[in-house]
Image: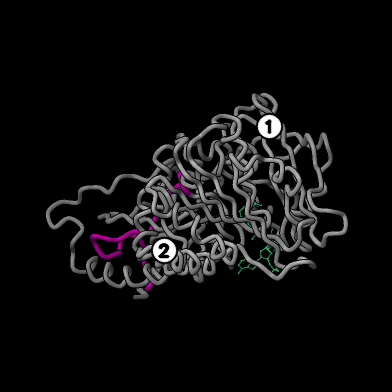
Amino acid sequence: MNKPLADAASLQKPFKQHVIDPETCIRCYTCEEACPIDAITHDDNNVVVDPTGCDYCMSCIAPCPTGAIDNWRVVMEPYSLDDQFGWDELPEQEDIGPGDTGSSAVEALDEEMERLLNEAHAGAGGKSKPPASASKPSVNLFTLGKPATATVQGNYRLTSETADSDVRHIILDLGDTSFPVLEGQSIGILPPGEDAAGKPFLPRLYSISSPRDGERPQTNNLSLTVKREPMGVCSNYVCDLKKGDRIQVTGPFGATFLMPNDPQANVIMICTGTGSAPFRAFTMRRQRTMPDADGRMILFFGARTPDALPYFGPLKKVPDRVLEKELCFSRATDSDKEYVQDRMRRERARVLTLLKSERTHIFVCGLKGMEEGVDGALAEIAREGAFDWPTLRTQMREEGRYHVETY
Ligand code: NAP
């Protein structure tokens, strides 16, 4: 597989070019970190792949939370880095004439790539599509070179003072700036300062935890759920922000992990810790705009203890009619260790009923490590209903009903 590095003029023609979808990319830069040969880079606008560097090793595919990385174009002349930096959306596959995409070099590459891609997608993640009923998102309106300024409206601790994690609810006021967001999207926050190499810190990405019309209806603000990480540059910056501080934000990002607008859609939400952020937004949206929706919403939410579970109090107050809550704890003193996948198994009958419905969407958000366990639980539950889970998962993903965003 590993072809030698080449300059653009000497690349085999037609050439299968690895490209990143700027609309679904959430600028988390995990692909850039995962690339062993530094073939992925970014400017103020986009994250891009160097056609003369990429050796199709696929190391970047699995870590990508959205599948934006998994895009390919067969071209006679590769798109340059400058071309890619300028994209707002991916160009269509161009017609490259008779034989089209089928030169023997490309075919041989295809076969090997398919094998590697299957390996990379072996887990629960993979290329995803937005729910058919989701609103059209705006993406990348504010960039590294042209960020928006937001003012901190509030910073509240969500976990008890005795809990070993400090998780914050941060409210950002956008003032007069038009910053349209949808439930499920993320924003970047630019921490001030430079890294050890003297480069400005990269923005860190946070899911928006408020609905599109703000913390309260018709307010031009949004909220985030941020956990202080001991050595985290951005999380400490954000968790220490005071009311009135002004900060630089980028985004919005994300065009697939979006709330279905359909009141009949059933939504299974599975999360750990701060991965609950988008599901707070989903729940508030449904409660605000369609409280009598026929579709069910179930939340499987795992944390170490009740006092470490973000939004524990407010969540309990959401009526069961709107949200069926399955909160489970891995280190509570009065109960056995339980992960979200254990609770899903316990509630298998309810999950299976929903899996059988073509109106059911599954969203998974939180720790990367839970993907495998959640996937295993879904496979077991599906088997009881005589479904083959990998087949059903692929079908759901293709229909915009299966979404994973884990880091
Ligand atoms: P956390 O407090 O470290 O963990 C939450 C719970 O998950 C704990 O009960 C933990 O149990 C359990 N857990 C650990 N391994 C698990 C596994 N393999 N399967 C199932 N459950 C498991 O969570 P966190 O630090 O808040 O992390 C949340 C993650 O979400 C982060 O990786 C973050 O990057 C990601 N995320 C955050 C946002 C956001 O907007 N803030 C958005 C999307 C994703 P034990 O510790 O007892 O093992």
Q: Which residue occupies 45% across, 68% down? A: 380
Magenta span: predominant SS is loop
* Residue drawn at the location 64% of the way across and 27% of the way down: 177
Residues at discs 1 and 2 in contact (Cβ within 8 Å): no
Instruction: Name the residue beneath numbered marker 1.
Output: 221
Q: Which badge, 1 or 2, is on the more N-terminal residue?
A: 1
Residue 382 numbered tag = 2
| Res 164 → quadrant | bottom right
Q: Could you tell whether 311 is left or right of 381 in the image?
A: right
- Give residue 242's position: percent from left, percent from top: 84, 41
Indicate yes or no: mark 2 CB to ligand 1 under 8 Å: no
Which sits in the foreground, 58 or 262? 262
- Left or right, residue 180 beside residue 122: right
**Helix, strand or loop at mark 1:** strand
Badge 2 marks a residue whose secondary structure is helix
The percent position of residue 45, horizontal first and vertical second, equals 53, 44
For the N terminus, the image quarter is bottom left
Relative to 66, residue 385 above or below: below
Residue 346 included in the magenta stretch of the image? no
Give the amino acid type for the residue marked by disc 1 in the picture: Asn
In front: 272, or 156? 272
The residue carrying mark 1 has its beta carbon less than 8 Å from ligand 1: no
Magenta residues span 4-24
Is 316 left or right of 393, judged from the image as shown? right
User: Taking 396 as reference, is 292 left or right?
Assistant: right
Q: Is residue 395 above or below residue 103?
A: above
- Quadrant in the picture for the C terminus: bottom right
Query: Which residue: 37% across, 48% down?
Result: 358
